[in-house]
Image: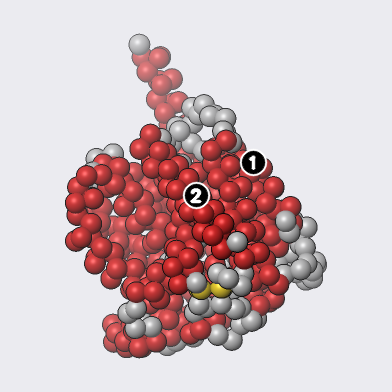
Amino acid sequence: MIITIYILFTMAFFLLLNFLFKTLFHKGFTFKLGLAFGVLYFIFIPVGILLLTGKVNLVKTDFGITTLTDVFLKKDTKASLILISYIFSLIFYLYFFKVRDYKKNKAFTPKLKQYFIVYFASLFIILVGSGLLKGGNWYEARYSFMVKNGALAILLLFVINAAKILIISSIIYLWTSGKLNFKLFLLYIISFTLFDMIVSGNRIYLFSTFVIIGLIFLKRYPLKILISLPFLVPLIYYIGYFASLFRHMRVPLFAKGIPTFEVFKNTFARAVRLDPPNLTSFFLNISESVNFNVIYNIINHYDKSLYGATYFKIFVYFVPRSIWAHKPESITKITADFFGSASLVTTIFGELHMNFSYLGIFLLPLILYLTESLLSYFKYNSPVFNYILFIMGLLFFRMPFSDELLTYLILVFMVYVFNVKFVFKKAYDNTIKKKVY
């Protein structure tokens, strides 16, 4: 059975790698490319550790108090086969489900200034409303703010996430279209994504940004990237190591309000002591391997069924809990309650399994097809949306489904609102020209 697992994981890896390279070099950035990269990164790095060492250790410094367990190659063969089934189901969707190409005539011009205004205004409301500017635990403060302000507070978080995706995608577009030189691009993109990671405590947007930049360079200069690998690997290692350390920093960093450089330095030193450099832990940390442990523990221990409740959160999130006390929770909250944590990521595989058990394996291609169709239908005719859809692919793989769908719909609404004036002005100018001529 172990040999079979080795073979199946290896087959799945090369099928995903083949899809990723073919899509990148022939189509560019797409929703499917984001999904494929998400699986390769968040699943196959821990899979590689599992196949090489026989186990994936739970990160005890972060999740030692939970009921989550280590993953063992020999012991968890059933769970491995079920995970493999989910992976092949996703591969089937990638290769055989073709979404209709909707012809878009909607004019779209990135409105970077407006996106920044929305982002900082929403962030300021949360920082002030949660009392975080005066100091405290970011997660506790944000949770209290969410509970106190309900749907409005949650909506602000979705607005912030939508704005930051638009900001990141627009800056990348300005660079790739030649409207922004590379030095300024790096200054803007690094400053914004690092700032966002520090104030939000979330690394996924910084990660998505540098994945896109890396893939752009790989597509443009494949031979040069290959030759440069001996020099790039140490750089990638230290960047990845710092990003993985941040999970130890984000709580104490804001303990006394906005951090000073001295606070940052002491917090960083503490994080290094908690998680000293180690090759195996490096790979597990950068891929957030706890998500891998969560999937195995869901398969092994979660014997209930949510019957799709977390997928319908999008329709009911605005209903106050004072009216509907048992309103469906986010999948991260349900999973955390079950395993004894504050918040746990399940990825798309874990969420499907908790909702539909083994039926989720067969529903996965259909859900992804419908999701991609919806995203494609509402997108605007602009290269900016290629980067947006790639980021959404990554997010849909890793984050709660309903949260990301809401984020995308808000994003599209923001694009519409900020471009309506442009469309009207263009139509007015064309009318004037016709009258003149």
Residue name at image x 45 percent, y 42 percent:
19
Quadrant of residue 266 within the rendered picture: bottom left
Q: Nearer the viewer, residue 164 or 418?
A: 164
**Callout 1 environment at 10 Å: few (<14), some (14 to 19), or many (20+)?**
few
Q: Residue placed at 28% from the left, 57% from the top? A: 188
* SS for callout 1: helix
Q: Can residue 141 be seen by looking at this rendering?
A: no
* Disc marking residue 199: none
Q: What residue is rendered at 49% in x and 68% in y?
A: 50
Identify residue for label 2: 11
The three-letter amino acid code for the residue at tag 1 is Leu
Q: 221 or 71, which is in the foreground?
A: 71
State the residue in front, 348 or 116: 348
In the displayed structure, would residue 374 be above or below residue 197?
A: above
Q: Position of residue 216 (x, y in %)?
A: 31, 46
Among numbered discs 1 and 2, the one appearing first in the sequence: 2
Mark 1, residue position: 370
Q: Is residue 328 left or right of residue 187?
A: right
The quarter of the picture where residue 301 lies is: bottom right
Alpha carbon of mark 1 to alpha carbon of mark 2: how far? 26 Å
